[in-house]
Amino acid sequence: MSEEIDRWIVYMKEHPHMWKSKHSAFINAQFSKHKEVLEKLKHSPEGRKKIIQIYSIKNPEGYKGLLGQN
Protein backbone atom coordinates (compact mmCIF):
# COMPACT_ATOMS: atom_id res chain seq x y z
CA MET A 1 0.00 0.00 0.00
CA SER A 2 2.81 2.41 0.79
CA GLU A 3 4.22 2.07 -2.74
CA GLU A 4 0.87 3.10 -4.22
CA ILE A 5 0.75 6.16 -2.00
CA ASP A 6 4.32 7.05 -2.88
CA ARG A 7 3.52 6.77 -6.61
CA TRP A 8 0.47 8.97 -6.19
CA ILE A 9 2.49 11.62 -4.33
CA VAL A 10 5.10 11.64 -7.11
CA TYR A 11 2.32 11.94 -9.72
CA MET A 12 0.74 14.87 -7.84
CA LYS A 13 4.06 16.68 -7.67
CA GLU A 14 4.86 16.08 -11.34
CA HIS A 15 1.33 16.98 -12.55
CA PRO A 16 0.09 19.70 -10.20
CA HIS A 17 -2.76 20.77 -12.50
CA MET A 18 -3.87 17.34 -13.70
CA TRP A 19 -4.14 15.24 -10.55
CA LYS A 20 -7.22 17.02 -9.20
CA SER A 21 -9.39 16.08 -12.17
CA LYS A 22 -8.24 12.45 -12.02
CA HIS A 23 -8.89 12.34 -8.30
CA SER A 24 -12.34 13.91 -8.72
CA ALA A 25 -13.21 11.44 -11.47
CA PHE A 26 -12.19 8.54 -9.23
CA ILE A 27 -14.21 9.81 -6.25
CA ASN A 28 -17.24 10.53 -8.45
CA ALA A 29 -17.02 7.02 -9.89
CA GLN A 30 -17.07 5.60 -6.36
CA PHE A 31 -20.26 7.53 -5.54
CA SER A 32 -21.81 6.50 -8.84
CA LYS A 33 -21.05 2.81 -8.26
CA HIS A 34 -22.46 3.05 -4.73
CA LYS A 35 -25.70 4.50 -6.07
CA GLU A 36 -25.87 1.80 -8.76
CA VAL A 37 -25.44 -0.98 -6.20
CA LEU A 38 -28.13 0.50 -3.96
CA GLU A 39 -30.55 0.73 -6.89
CA LYS A 40 -29.96 -2.93 -7.72
CA LEU A 41 -30.47 -3.89 -4.09
CA LYS A 42 -33.73 -1.94 -3.89
CA HIS A 43 -35.17 -4.02 -6.71
CA SER A 44 -33.84 -7.40 -5.62
CA PRO A 45 -35.54 -9.92 -3.36
CA GLU A 46 -34.67 -9.14 0.25
CA GLY A 47 -32.94 -5.95 -0.98
CA ARG A 48 -34.71 -3.66 1.47
CA LYS A 49 -33.75 -5.97 4.32
CA LYS A 50 -30.11 -6.01 3.16
CA ILE A 51 -29.95 -2.20 2.97
CA ILE A 52 -31.38 -1.92 6.48
CA GLN A 53 -28.76 -4.37 7.70
CA ILE A 54 -25.83 -2.71 5.86
CA TYR A 55 -26.65 0.73 7.26
CA SER A 56 -27.84 -0.53 10.67
CA ILE A 57 -31.10 1.35 10.16
CA LYS A 58 -33.24 1.34 13.29
CA ASN A 59 -36.10 3.42 11.87
CA PRO A 60 -36.88 2.33 8.29
CA GLU A 61 -39.73 4.84 8.06
CA GLY A 62 -37.17 7.64 8.24
CA TYR A 63 -35.26 6.26 5.23
CA LYS A 64 -38.00 5.84 2.63
CA GLY A 65 -35.89 7.45 -0.15
CA LEU A 66 -32.92 5.21 0.54
CA LEU A 67 -35.14 2.16 0.73
CA GLY A 68 -37.06 2.96 -2.45
CA GLN A 69 -40.37 3.74 -0.81
CA ASN A 70 -41.05 7.26 -2.10
Image (cartoon, rainbow, N blue to C red):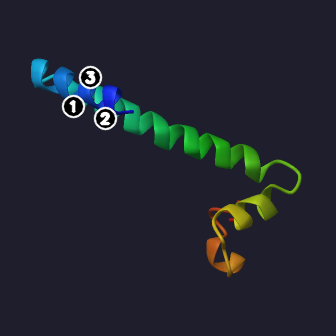
* Residue identified by numbered label 3: 7
Element under disc 3? helix
Of marks 3 and 1, the one in the foreground: 3
Q: Considering the image in quadrants, where does the C terminus appear?
A: bottom right
Residue at the far front in the pictured view: 2
Distance from disc 2 to disc 1, alpha carbons, whole Å, reads: 6 Å
Name the amino acid, label 3: Arg
Label 2 crowd bin: few (<14), some (14–19), many (20+), radius 10 Å:
few
Determine the residue positioned at 72% across, 67% down.
52
* Residue identified by numbered label 2: 24
* Residue identified by numbered label 1: 20
The correct choice, above or below, for 38 with respect to 63 in the image is above
Name the amino acid, label 2: Ser
Of marks 2 and 3, the one in the foreground: 3
Element under disc 1? helix
Q: Earlier in the sequence, mark 2 or mark 3?
A: 3
Residue 4 position within the rendered picture, expressed as x and y whole percent measured from the top left: 34, 27
